[in-house]
Image (spheres, rainbow, N blue to C red):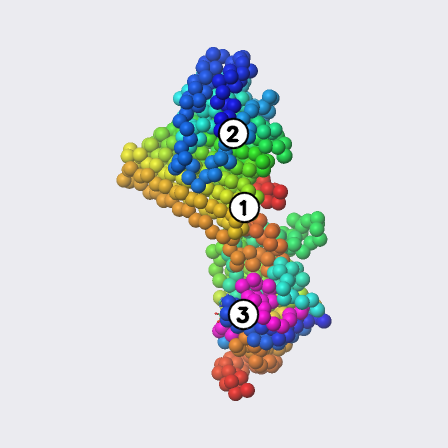
Amino acid sequence: MSTLQIDNLSASVGKEQILNNLNFTLPKGEVHAIMGPNGSGKSTLSKVLAGHPDYQVTGGNACMDGTELLGLNPDEIARLGLFLAFQYPVEVPGVSIANFIRAAVKSRLPEGESIKAVEFYKELYLKMDDLGMDRSFTSRSMNEGFSGGEKKRCEILQMSMLNPKYCILDETDSGLDIDALRVVSEGINQMKNPDRGILVITHYQRLLDYIVPDKVHVMWEGRIVRSGDKTLALELEDKGYDWIKEEVAAA
Amino acid sequence: MKTSFESSDFFQAFSEKRSWEPGWMADFRKDSWNRFATLPKTKIKDEKWRFSPRTRFGYNDCDQLTDSPKPTTLEGKSSKNVIFESFDQAILDHPKLLSILPSCTGPKLGSDETFLLGSSFSESGFILKAKEEHKEEEAFICRHFAPNQNRSLFQQSIVSIDPFAEVTLIEYFDSEDQSSTGILSNLSHIQVGEGAKLNRIVVQRLNNHSTFNHLEKIELGRNAQFTNISLQLGSAQTRVESRGDIIGDAGEFNNYSLSLGRNNQLFDQRTIQHHIAPHGKSNLLFKNALLENSKAIFSGLIKVDPKAQNTDSFQTNRNLLLSKEAEASSLPGLEILANEVKCSHGATTSKIDEQELFYLQSRGIPKSTAEKLIVLGFFEDIIGQTPNPDLVESLRDEVSKFFHT
Ligand SMILES: Nc1ncnc2c1ncn2[C@@H]1O[C@H](COP(=O)(O)OP(=O)(O)OP(=O)(O)O)[C@@H](O)[C@H]1O
Ligand SMILES: [Mg+2]
């Protein structure tokens, strides 16, 4: 029950089928990585799980700790405990980081209960310090005019403020400089715990040097076509994807 | 259909009610009413009412005056340098200040009828005069009340800021009660003298059965500065006509407005930034966020006279639609007769960004709250213009409160 379990998931956008009978299980307490060529459907998988309205689910199930996610509204899915750090975080003009995160935290409180402002800011500032974010960022509009790396840090900040049960990090390492990669990886590692499952989507081994995965999966044409331990990532780094594509074609 | 305002008996009865007024005021009313009675018939096609469902602004359903109009209440005192009084009191105390009335023309952007009715039948309003070089830290606050029980209330106000004085004025427009229909028609005559500064904030929260007519003309002297921030939140329908005339060299006119449309609300906005003197600056930003079946019309003109060289003038209208039924029409206009000018105008209407909405929802924020945050974000560059930082948060709250009523 303590898993994010995906069975035979198929999804399309418009007429195009993108996910094809995808199977995948992420148990709590583990870190998994998904790698795969551009366009293989990694971001689509994460957005389908988060309830994005652009995608039509054409078959399958996705259960989080036994609760079916497919068909729920994005905000319900999030409150159940799924967090998606976006590959391309969206700019929200005029909505400050502080107000945004407050609203997100408040949405998890029981009706009528309000946030204790002092504690909220204390926690927020602490986590910003950890991520090397200047405190003045709290009053800036969410992601507006942020550099690529600042956007990614801000995703991790949100994740750590919201205490999700399962985290999906979609190419959080892209756009980060070497120091930022370390800082952000530390932030992610701090989130590791026996009650939380973490899925990192990445193209590069270097992230996995910091965040060591329990399992590595390869996605191709909307399916997981191979799974292995952390050495699979090293093998991919070395050989690329062609050999896997050939194997799939042969099968 | 005729309204009782057109009947000479009706005007006669009104005059008797106001028999305490001095002769010059009675003459002014009589003259205004005569002009009203001889107004040419409403044209079927009137450019100044383009896109507007004009009948919604008619007086037919509310063509009686209230027996006991609730007067504008004032917070802030007169002092040796400031006159801040109700309009009625000023008729008795300051006839000289009111002597400008016969020469006031109003914005002249379509509502001649309302302007002349207001001049004839005004029973409320205020005057604010700040004497030369007087700087007042505290804001002057006026609370105006729309009538109920299918009545109309007309009111006028005069704001006159003498050279080098600085004043902040906040005007609230509310309904007497939440359930009944009424029309509040307000005329504002505003003059800002040389080097003087007026910050003015309007918060309109009429109940959703009532009509608000808001006609204003602002005249700016040399180096004068005027900044207006309007929050149009309430009413069933609101017609705003706003004229800013830059008469003195290097006057600066800033006009910012936001409207939050719900249900069947209509916001009909007509503006002009008229540069008469050189080196003037004007900036206008009107933003409308429209939910449900609400509707906004914006028609704005930048007019630069031949003598008004070195003018900087900007005009922007932005509309955010939150439903398929909401509707926005925009008519930006330029009429530039000087050659050394920097002018631009722009209008955009867009739907709420689905990716933004999803992003907020993906953090657990329910859709309605996400929409509210996006709208507040959309309004932020209007509210952020508020000169007094203490007021910013309270203006945000005003908008926020209206979101779920
Ligand atoms: N909203 C959409 N509209 C049209 N096509 C889409 C949409 N979303 C995804 N696709 C298509 O689906 C395929 C998979 O895209 P996806 O973003 O999931 O790939 P990815 O594995 O995340 O790639 P990358 O490694 O480049 O991030 C691509 O061909 C993409 O063009
Ligand atoms: Mg991707």
Q: CA distance from mark 3 to mark 1?
A: 33 Å
* Residue B31 screen position, x and y as percent: 43, 18
* Residue A237 screen position, x and y as percent: 51, 80
Residue B294 in view (yes/no): yes
Q: CA distance from mark 2 to mark 3?
A: 56 Å
Extreme-bottom residue of the structure: A250
Select label 1 or label 2 by which is in front.
2
Q: Nearer the viewer, residue B178 or B113?
A: B113
Q: Nearer the viewer, residue B121 or A28?
A: B121
> Magenta span covers which residues?
A38-64
* B193 relative to A165, above or below: above
* Residue B193 screen position, x and y as percent: 41, 27
Select label 3 or label 1 by which is in front.
1
Split into 4 quadrants, where in the image is the C terminus of chain B? top right
Q: What amino acid is found at the position of numbered circle 1 in the picture? A: Asn
Residue A51 location, quadrant: bottom right
Where does label 3 land, which residue? A12
Q: What amino acid is found at the position of numbered circle 2 in the picture? A: Tyr
Q: Mark number for residue B59? A: 2
Mark 3 chain: A
Is the residue marked by circle 1 packed among few (<14), some (14-19), or many (20+) residues within 10 Å? some
Mark 2 chain: B
Where does label 1 land, which residue? B293
Per the image, is A43 magenta?
Answer: yes
Residue at the spot x=36%, y=30% of the render?
Answer: B247
Is the residue marked by circle 2 packed among few (<14), some (14-19), or many (20+) residues within 10 Å? many
* Residue B221 screen position, x and y as percent: 38, 28
The answer to whether dots 3 and 1 both sit on one chain is no
The answer to whether dots 2 and 3 both sit on one chain is no
